[in-house]
Image (tube, rainbow, N blue to C red):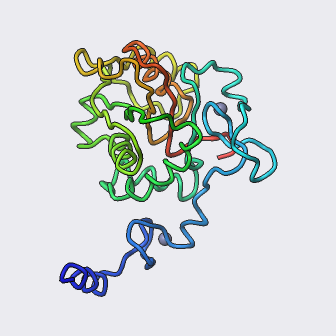
Amino acid sequence: MIGTAIQSLVEAVYPPQCAMCDARTAVEFSLCGACWRDTPFIEGLTCDACGAPLPGQPGTPDESDALCDDCLRVARPWRRGRAAFAYRDTGRRMVLRLKHSDRLELARVAAPWLLRAGRPLWPDRPAVVPVPLHWRRLARRKYNQSAVLAQRLSEIAPADYMPDVLLRRRFTAPLDGHDRDARFRSLDGAIVPHAVRGGQLKDRKVILVDDVMTSGATFAAATEACLAAGAAEVCVLALARVTKDA
Ligand SMILES: [Zn+2]
Ligand SMILES: [Zn+2]
């Protein structure tokens, strides 16, 4: 009772606010109507390998094995993939804030969207594994935004969160602006299973989590590392997918 009263008092003084703007919202850790409408959630028919939206009837059941042009051209080592929204508008701003502005509460807002996008590929109690950051980047940024997302996701889904089974052993410069081939060359072999904890992946079904998928080179390197550690199957889940029309 007292707790509820204090909560009401707190809400009266600090009413819940939209995670992306100053507007008030009915509940905490949510978006206002305007920010919600500006977030390009991926709905309808999607690429089964990366979750990019595909042209088709809106609301087409999400059970297709259709692939986008990228995934037809580049063989993906993982089995299936999805993304919550396209990397533009509020979707892009949210990813940048999560990555650079210490706005970790955004992961709590985004976790249900990740889960909704990942439902079609969710196996029985998967290992949820974030794409690792190199320790030098981690030291500078202080947190791995993909690990924060993966942790929040595994709090609301039947899953085992495994934050330290993969290692980034090579420091790679930011890949913005690089073409696809350069990204794949730069990431090849850059991620490995942890010498001891990587053993936890043996025979597990894995959901790899990252904040953004661009070319898929990072997911490919992380997938190879999971498979090298004996994972039974790997699917990938990104908060945002960079699409050509973005
Ligand atoms: Zn808002
Ligand atoms: Zn695709």
Q: Quadrant of ligand 2?
A: top right
Residue 201: x and y in percent read 35, 22
Q: Is residue 95 left or right of residue 120?
A: left
Q: Would you say 222 lies left or right of 113 here?
A: left
Residue at 37% from the left image edge and 24% from the top image edge: 172
The answer to whether residue 225 is above or below residue 242 is above
Against 199, is 37 above or below?
Answer: below
Along the viewing direction, whichever of 179 and 110 lies nearer the viewer: 110
* Residue 110 placement (x, y as % from top left): 45, 54
- Number of callouts: 0
Q: Quadrant of the N terminus?
A: bottom left
* Percent position of residue 104, x then y: 32, 54
Task: Say above or below: 43 vs 70.
Answer: below
Rendered residue at 52%/52% (across/down): 92
The answer to whether 35 is drawn above or below residue 53 in the figure is below
For this view, does 220 lie left or right of residue 63? Answer: left
Q: Residue 20, position in %: x, y?
A: 44, 65
> At x 50% / y 72%, what residue is drawn?
32
